Amino acid sequence: MPFTARPNRTRSFLTIALGAMLSVSFLAACGDDDDATPEEAFCDAGDSLETNVQALGDLDLVAEGTDALEEQLGAIETDLTDMKETGSEVAGEQIADVETAVADLETSLNDLGGELSVDNAASAIDAVSRIVTSAQAVYTELDSTCP
């Protein structure tokens, strides 16, 4: 009896599964986020910045601690990066001012050293206030740029 090769069903299944995964990945890459214009992406990042700065200003530093502050700070830094990447010529100076205030807050957090007290929290609270204030200038630019 001659030997006849059997189809390798495992290999066929893996090929089909790999093809399906690649198709799903390709479709996900072509989602709505890629359809946004640079102006829309800039404005969306500005909206996110406003939300995150508001949340930063609303934090109860004593009750929520430095972890919550650092988390919110990270979100703000992401928003600023997104804004610079999508519209650096718009509000560039104002964004730089917010970045300076963010750097000041990071310095204050480093100075806290994980030990939060009424005395050493004052500099962090002052830095948060400067972020909120400097972000107002960004919002003014957004109002004139974004629909």
Image (cartoon, helix red, strand yellow):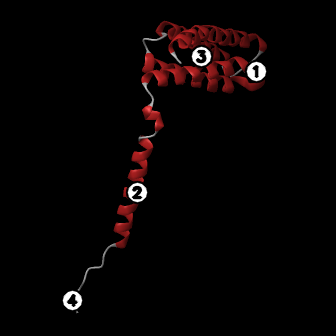
| Marks 4 & 1, CB-CB < 8 Å contact | no
Q: Amino acid at mark 4?
A: Pro
Q: Secondary structure at mark 2?
A: helix
Give above or below for 2 relative to 126: below
Q: Is residue 79 left or right of residue 132?
A: left
Residue drawn at 60 percent across, 21 percent down: 73
x, y percentage for residue 83?
A: 49, 19
User: Which residue is at the far left?
Assistant: 2
Q: Nearer the viewer, mark 2 or mark 1?
A: 2
Q: Which residue is labeled 3 in the image?
A: 106
Q: Is residue 117 left or right of residue 34?
A: right
The residues tagged by marks 3 and 1 sit, at their Cα atoms, a distance apart of 17 Å
Q: Which residue is labeled 1 in the image?
A: 60
Q: Nearer the viewer, mark 4 or mark 3?
A: 4
Q: Nearer the viewer, mark 3 or mark 2?
A: 2
Q: Secondary structure at mark 1?
A: loop
Q: Nearer the viewer, mark 2 or mark 4?
A: 2
Give above or below for 64 relative to 89: below
Q: Amino acid at mark 2?
A: Ala
Residue drawn at 45 percent across, 44 percent down: 28
